[in-house]
Structures are given as C-alpha cells and as structure tokens.
C-alpha cells in the first residue's frame, strides 16, 4: 500500500509554555561530576553558582578558603559549585514506514512529528541540539537539525521526507555515526510494527551499539491500536492497510478475533524488544484512547506534559 | 403482455434486492495494523445478516440491476426490428412438379419431368446471369401433394446439383400448396418490414404440367412453365362395387371405368382373381364420353388385380393408371348379435344374424314399438310398428328426407303405391325425427340419434315370390341395420387406397389412380412469363430483431459479473 505523508498540523502545545522548560542537565552540578553520562564538557567557561560542604573526593582546588574561614565551622570547608555550559544532543529517529501514516485523519506520524517539534522547541533556546532523523529510506539523508534559528517544523519537515529514494523500507543508520555522539539521547518514535527482516535486525544491533556509548535510549511506542479497534467495532469488515494482501480482506470481527490480534501484535513487538539489551533502554508507550473519536491535540498535550521521561529530561523554570 | 412483464420484472427486482439485502456487508476500514490480519480466517461468504435494511450498494448489485434492465428491454423489444443493409440481386424460387403425371412421355422421347428439369437448369443459369455478381439466392422445391424444400442456397452450382436428386413420385397434385407459397411470397414482398426473409423472392418459377391459374400477383414475378402437351393415354379411372346382395349387402359385382385421351384405340381389361386365375378379359367399348365400363362378378375375398392393356400399335404415354387392385375383405360379412323380440324369426335366420338373449350384449335390438322397455335402450334398436291390414283411404303425399341413409336406394314411387298405414308422431318415443311422413304427421320411417333407434312400419316377409311391399320392407330394414350398426363404428375396410405421403409406392390395394393425373389431354396448356425477363431487383432491407442483441449484452454482463466474483477483488463480491 502506498503511503503519503499527511498534512502537517501545528503543534498543539503553546510554544511559550514549552520554552519555559530547560533540560535538567543544566542544574547545578558539582565540578567533579562534569562529563557524566548525560553531558560533556564544552569549553572552559564556568559560572559560580553556590557553596556546598566539602565531601571526600571533592577537588581541593575548588575549596574557598576565605569563605570557609568566614562562614563555616572549623571542621567544615566550603567548596565552590559551578554551572557548566554543557550542550546536550537529542537524536530523534522517526519511523516513517507506511503503518505510521495511519490511522486517518490524524496519523501516528503526526504524533511523532509533534513530539519531535515539542522537544525541539524545548531545547533550541538554550543552544542544545536536537536532530530529527528519518529512520527509513535513502541512506545518508533524512536529517533535520533544530537549533536557535529553526524551531518550527512547518516547512522543513517536508524536506525530511522528500528524498526517500527507491529503498523506502531500508533502515537509514548511516547518520548515527556522525550525529549520535556518546552521552546523547537517542529517542526512537515508532509503532514497532517492523517486519521481521534484515532491517529490524540492523536496527536492533544499532541500538545495542548505541547503548555501549553511554547513550540514553528512549523508545516511544505510538500505540494507536486501542483507538483503531474501537473504530473498527464488531461485525463484517473489509480491511485495508499497509502490508496487506487484498484477496483475503473480509473478516468477521468479534472479541475473540480481537484477542487473537492483540496477542499477535504484542508478540511481534516483544520479539523486536528482546533483541535489545534488557534494561538498557526506556520504553514509553503512548496508547491512544480506546474510543472511536477523540481530540488528538488535547490528548497529545496531556500525554506530553505528563510523560515521565520528558519530566526526567526537562524541568520547568521556577 | 405489459402487465405480465411488469409482474415478471417486479419479481426479479425484488429477488435481486433481497439477495443483496441479505448479503454480508463489509464496511471498508483502513488500519495501520492491517498486516496482523493476515493470520485471521477470512469471513464466511455465505454468512448473511437477516435484517431489513437498504441493499448493500455493491458493484454486483449494480450489475445485477443492469442485467435485469437488459432482460426487460429484451422482452419489450421482442417485436422490434432494426434496419440492416439494403440488398440487391436475384432471389429465385423454383417449384417443380413431381406428381405422377410428370412421368408422361413426350414426343421427343423424354418425360415431362425431364423437360421440367431442363427448364429449371435454364432458369438457374438465367438467374445467375441476371444477378451479375450481386446477391444470388436460389431455392428449389418440389411439389405434388406437398411442397418440400430441396435446397436453399446462394450457389447456382449447388442448386443445379440439387436438381439431380429430384424424381417423380406416384402421387397426385395439390396446386393449392403452390398457390399458398406464391401468396406468402407476395405478402412478404408487399410488406416493408417482412417477418420472414426466407419468403422474400424476386422471382418464382413454377414448372408443372398443370396450367397457370391467373391470380392477383403484384409484388413477385411468377414464371409459370406448363410442360404438358396433348398425349395418348388409356387408363383406369375408377373401380367401384356395382352390385350387392340385397340382404347381406355383400359385394357381388365390381365395375371398372376406363377413359382415354388422345387417339381412340381399342383396349382390353383383364381381372385376376385372388387365386391368380384370369377372371375376366373384356374388350373395352369406348363411349362418346371417352369412357368405357366393364363389370365382373366377385365372390371370394382377397386381392383382385385389374390390368388395362392397349393394343400393340397404340403409344400409351402414361402408365401409372394401367393397373388397379382392390381387396375384398372377409370383414365385408358382418355377423350381428341381435336381440330379436319379434315372434317371426324366419327373417332372422335368412339374414344369418345370431339370436342372443336379452341379458347378453347385443349389437342391435329388434322389438315391437309397444314394448316400451326398449324405447330408450342404449343399444341400437329397431322399433317395429304394428301393420294395419288394408290400404289407407285418405292417402296424403309423403314428406321425404331424401338425404337420410334410411331411405337410400328406396323407390319412392313404389313406396307411395303401397299406401301403408303410418302412426301419429306422438306415439313415438321422445326424440324421434320423421324420415317418411305425411302432412298429418303420420310417420312411416323415423330415427333418433341418441340413443340410436329407428322406427320401421313392418318387417319384410319371407315369401317365395316377394311383392313390391316386401322389397321396400327389405330395403328399409337393411338401411336401418346399416345406419344403426355404423353408429357402433364398425367401419369396413376400403376396397383400395391411393398412394399418399406416408405410402408413396403402389403396393397391394394401394394404387396410383389420383384424379386428373391420367388426363393427358392438356387442351390449352397455359404458361406465363419467361425466364428471359429475369432481372435483379431489391431484395429489401434486412430487418434484424433487436432482442437477441440485448439478450447477448445481458449474457455478457452476467459472465462479467460471475467472472469478477470468482477472480476479481472482494469489491466484486
């Protein structure tokens, strides 16, 4: 089935609201903790933030002897804390296979794009990098950088999907080498309906390798099935959609059939996840409401703002 | 027609809608997880949803409605014709006489039939020439007692070949059949929209030894070739019984009537008995009406053969009428079971009827009029009056129903002179009609059809020297017995039969003495038209019926619908 990129809808969350968030990695950290698994030192500039009691292992060079003498107890030494001007890189891979272009009229791809754009809006004001990556298609292309100068997806997203090439089903892993440095966050947004083929194997291998480089792997499962099931209902249906053989498309749908289907979908996803090192990634399932119709914008906003993983990465300014 | 069509269409429409209303309807849904449906069992096609709802608007429904519409259109256009191509050329129908008389030999040595075939060949050649490469159609038929098609072709060669298969049949001629065909062609040619193009001809060529009978013909050129010409013929005209036993009605004498045409020359007739003996050889004496009759006695049952022999110097051109045969059947003697209720039984013995008791099944009852128990018997009954002695004084003229079989061969003058007593009609049982009565309704002879009964005034007496009244009584009795027994359908075998379409060859007592076939006089042989006049004309515009085309479209739609249902995508199911 041929799938086309649906019309891109504006981000349903207020940009000004998103811009109040900043990455938690910008909080005050001890100088010795720089270069942790999330961040990487960049440059030499360091800004004083506050004092803290000396702990074993603190660099004695940062002990403020004068302040210790003035304010602290004799046995207490005060150590200077600094804010490091570290820039974080978030690499967001968008699954662009045909199944992501459904359901209609609001597709899973729309959710993925909204999520990517929201992350971009949150990271851009502080100079952090967010790269949108087209997971399938012509190898080597399909990247869209978010920065201070480009925090909207309205037009650039078309470029992202413009050059798919002939091999639309081939996983596009080459950009990872250059744009996914150690300590970066790699977020993969997909429905995980991958075919059990070489591409899925390559992708799982790439995820495993990325974990070795102290990267934070976040899998976001856009699960529209509850909503689609509610829309299908019970009865005779002629099914169409990506990856389907047309000469056997009429089914009598009932609860038993749905039970079988859900088992099949779940087993399929688990087969892929088992290939990834256990416990070395975070999985967030964005299940759509089990109703035939709902307000996608409201649902996305609510889901995004309450997403635990988002809250782990970002914090709202006081 | 229209009302039936509406009912028929309505039933079909209701059927189509019902089938589509009961079809499982598959709502089309596009889902992202469609690939996981591959492992599911497909829906059962026959599973129906028994609920009233709008019919599923599917492609099969539209196709079925289209088929229905085409079917109705085909029925509506049953009589409609559309114009085809204008055709020019020559369409010739040759009808050749193959009756027995066509065997008559000509002066040239051949027969009339040979001449007819030659004329047919010339006619075919003339038609081919006149067609000049345009359409040529030749139909060859033979006629005698029927018109039978030999060939209907567009090839002159095939038509000529077909002539070879023709031969004379010893049958009579029915020109009425030929005239009917001419009338049919006339009708088709006159019509702008002919129903049957097989009867659309530009020319008809009739070749016979019968003369053309002028009739009003305007739309087809009829060429009538009379190949007959005067010729010598002596032949048997008829064989009939000429004498019967007055009481038993058995044939005792036969007569042979002969006739001659052309030259008057002596001839002899010889009769061979069933045993093969020469029964009689008689020299014919021709009378002024060109006929001669020979009578001879017959006694034994069996085949009798009659042969007419011309003198050696006579050239008899027609031979089918030179022999005849007849069968004198045993059945001619009928043994009747009668309930004889009269005292006098000598008459019963003299006619050799069987006397049976009343309780047994009788062929005929013979009882006095006064015995009312037999007045309405279902068995044919002869009611006999009581003769009154002495002659009637106030004798009135009798009213006679001459055509009735009861009085056949009766000498009415002799009957009148008898002056017998009649009885008032009111004394007869109900339903009787008078055959012989006077103006005062005194009845001598009467009959009733149902139940069959005859009233006679008296029975004949058995005397050594019967008088005129006894002869009359005998005749009336014989006529009455015959009429009553014939109502029991005890028909006697005919003496001879003529050849017919089922039995074309003379054999036994089946002979070829068809009336008129031996008449070789051909006094004024009349022909009409000439094959030289043959020319090409319009064969008319072909009218093609519309309904087969519409029906064919319907069949194509049906095939398409079934084919797509079997091999197409689910949208076609």
Image (cartoon, coloured by chain):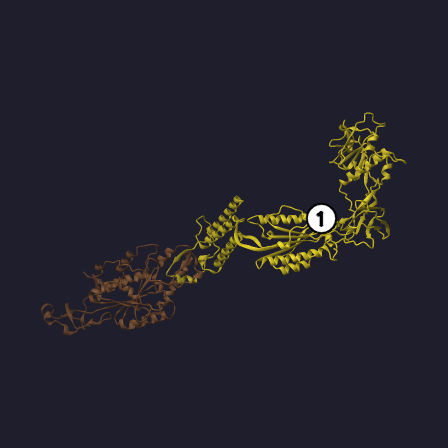
Q: Quadrant of residue A71?
A: bottom left
Visible residue check, residue B65: yes
Q: Which residue corresponds to mark 1?
A: B524
Residue B562 in the image: x percent, y percent? Answer: 50, 57
Q: Relative to B395, does residue B76 appear above or below in the rendering? A: below
What is the letter of the yellow chain?
B
Q: Relative to A255, does residue A174 appear above or below in the rendering? A: below
Question: Chain A appears what colour?
Answer: brown
Residue A179 in the image: x percent, y percent? Answer: 27, 71
Is disc 1 surrounded by few (<14), some (14 to 19) or many (20+) residues within 10 Å?
few
Which quadrant would the N terminus of chain B be assigned to in this image? top right
Q: Chain of mark 1?
A: B
- Number of labels in the image equals 1
Q: Nearer the viewer, residue B136 or B367?
A: B136
At mark 1, the secondary structure is: loop
Residue B431 in the image: x percent, y percent? Answer: 73, 32
Q: Relative to B127, does residue A87 appear above or below in the rendering? A: below
Q: Nearer the viewer, residue B96 or B473?
A: B96
**Which residue lies at the image location 37% right of the left edge and 61% below the top edge?**
B32
**Which residue lies at the image location 29% right of the left edge and 64% below the top edge?**
A158
């Amino acid at each position: 089935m041929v799938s086309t990129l649906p019309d891109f809808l504006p981000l349903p969350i207020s940009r000004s609201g998103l811009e109040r968030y900043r990455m938690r990695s910008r909080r005050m950290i001890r100088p010795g903790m720089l270069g942790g698994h999330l961040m990487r030192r960049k440059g030499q500039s360091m800004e004083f933030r506050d004092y803290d009691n000396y702990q074993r292992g603190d660099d004695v060079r940062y002990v403020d002897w004068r302040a210790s003498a003035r304010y602290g107890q004799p046995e207490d030494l005060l150590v200077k804390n600094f804010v490091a001007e570290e820039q974080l890189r978030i690499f967001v891979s968008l699954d662009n296979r045909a199944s992501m272009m459904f359901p209609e009229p609001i597709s899973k791809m729309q959710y993925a794009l909204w999520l990517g754009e929201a992350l971009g809006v949150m990271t851009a004001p502080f100079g952090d990098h967010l790269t949108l990556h087209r997971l399938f298609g012509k190898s080597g292309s399909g990247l869209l950088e978010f920065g201070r100068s480009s925090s909207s997806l309205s037009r650039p997203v078309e470029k992202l999907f413009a050059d798919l090439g002939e091999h639309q089903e081939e996983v596009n892993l080459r950009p990872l080498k250059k744009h996914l440095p150690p300590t970066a966050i790699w977020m993969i947004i997909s429905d995980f309906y991958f075919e059990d083929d070489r591409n899925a194997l390559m992708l799982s291998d790439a995820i495993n390798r990325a974990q070795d480089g102290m990267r934070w792997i976040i899998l976001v499962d856009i699960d529209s099935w509850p909503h689609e099931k509610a829309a299908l209902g019970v009865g005779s249906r002629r099914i169409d959609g990506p990856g389907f053989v047309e000469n056997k498309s009429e089914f009598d749908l009932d609860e038993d059939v749905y039970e079988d289907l859900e088992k099949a979908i779940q087993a399929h996803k688990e087969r892929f996840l088992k290939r990834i090192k256990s416990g070395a990634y975070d999985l967030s399932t964005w299940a759509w409401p089990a109703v035939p119709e709902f307000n996608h914008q409201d649902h996305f906003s609510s889901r995004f703002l309450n997403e635990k993983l988002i809250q782990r990465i970002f914090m709202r300014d006081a | 027609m229209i009302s039936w069509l509406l009912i028929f269409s309505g039933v079909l429409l209701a059927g189509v809608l019902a089938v589509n209303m009961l079809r499982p309807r598959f709502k089309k849904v596009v889902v992202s997880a469609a690939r996981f449906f591959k492992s599911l069992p497909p829906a059962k096609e026959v599973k129906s949803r028994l609920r009233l709802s709008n019919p599923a608007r599917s492609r099969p429904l539209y196709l079925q409605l289209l088929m229905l519409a085409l079917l109705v259109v085909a029925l509506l256009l049953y009589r409609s014709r559309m114009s085809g191509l204008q055709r020019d050329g020559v369409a010739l129908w040759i009808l050749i006489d193959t009756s027995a008389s066509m065997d008559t030999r000509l002066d040239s040595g051949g027969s009339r039939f040979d001449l007819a075939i030659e004329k047919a060949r010339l006619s075919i050649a003339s038609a081919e020439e006149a067609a000049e490469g345009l359409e040529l159609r030749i139909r060859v038929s033979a006629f005698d007692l029927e018109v039978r098609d030999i060939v209907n072709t567009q090839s002159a060669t095939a038509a000529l070949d077909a002539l070879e298969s023709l031969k004379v049949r010893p049958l009579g001629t029915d020109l009425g059949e030929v005239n009917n065909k001419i009338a049919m062609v006339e009708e088709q040619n006159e019509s702008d929209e002919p129903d049957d193009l097989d009867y659309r001809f530009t020319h008809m060529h009739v070749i016979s030894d019968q003369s053309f009978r002028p009739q009003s013909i305007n739309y087809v050129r009829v060429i009538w070739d009379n190949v007959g010409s005067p010729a010598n013929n002596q032949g048997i005209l008829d064989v009939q019984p000429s004498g019967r036993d007055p009481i038993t009605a058995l044939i005792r004498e036969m007569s042979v009537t002969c006739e001659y045409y052309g030259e008057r020359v002596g001839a002899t007739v010889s009769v061979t008995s069933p045993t093969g003996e020469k029964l009689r050889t008689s020299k014919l004496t021709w009378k002024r009406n060109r006929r001669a009759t020979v009578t001879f006695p017959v006694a034994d049952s069996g085949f009798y053969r009659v042969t007419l022999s011309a003198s050696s110097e006579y050239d008899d051109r027609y031979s089918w009428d030179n022999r005849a045969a007849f069968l004198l059947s045993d059945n001619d003697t009928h043994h009747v079971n009668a309930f004889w209720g009269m005292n006098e039984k000598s008459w019963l013995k003299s006619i050799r009827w069987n006397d049976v008791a009343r309780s047994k099944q009788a062929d005929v009852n013979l009882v006095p009029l006064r015995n009312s128990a037999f007045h309405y018997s279902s068995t044919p009954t002869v009611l006999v009056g009581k003769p009154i002695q002495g002659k009637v004084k106030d004798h009135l003229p009798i009213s006679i129903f001459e055509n009735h079989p009861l009085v056949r061969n009766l000498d009415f003058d002799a009957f009148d002179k008898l002056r017998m007593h009649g009885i008032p009609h009111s004394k007869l049982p109900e339903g009787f009609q008078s055959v012989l009565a006077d103006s005062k309704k005194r009845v001598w002879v009467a009959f009733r059809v149902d139940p069959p009964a005859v009233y006679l005034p008296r029975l004949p007496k058995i005397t050594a020297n019967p008088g005129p009244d006894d002869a009359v009584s005998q005749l009336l009795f014989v006529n009455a017995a015959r009429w009553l027994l014939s109502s029991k359908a005890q028909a006697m075998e005919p003496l001879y039969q003529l050849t017919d379409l089922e039995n074309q060859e003379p054999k036994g007592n089946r002979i070829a003495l068809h009336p008129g076939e031996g008449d070789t006089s051909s006094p004024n042989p009349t022909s009409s038209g000439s094959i030289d006049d043959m020319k090409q004309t319009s064969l008319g515009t072909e009218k093609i019926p519309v309904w087969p085309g519409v029906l064919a479209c319907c069949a194509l739609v049906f095939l398409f619908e079934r084919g797509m249902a079997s091999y197409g995508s689910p949208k076609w199911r």
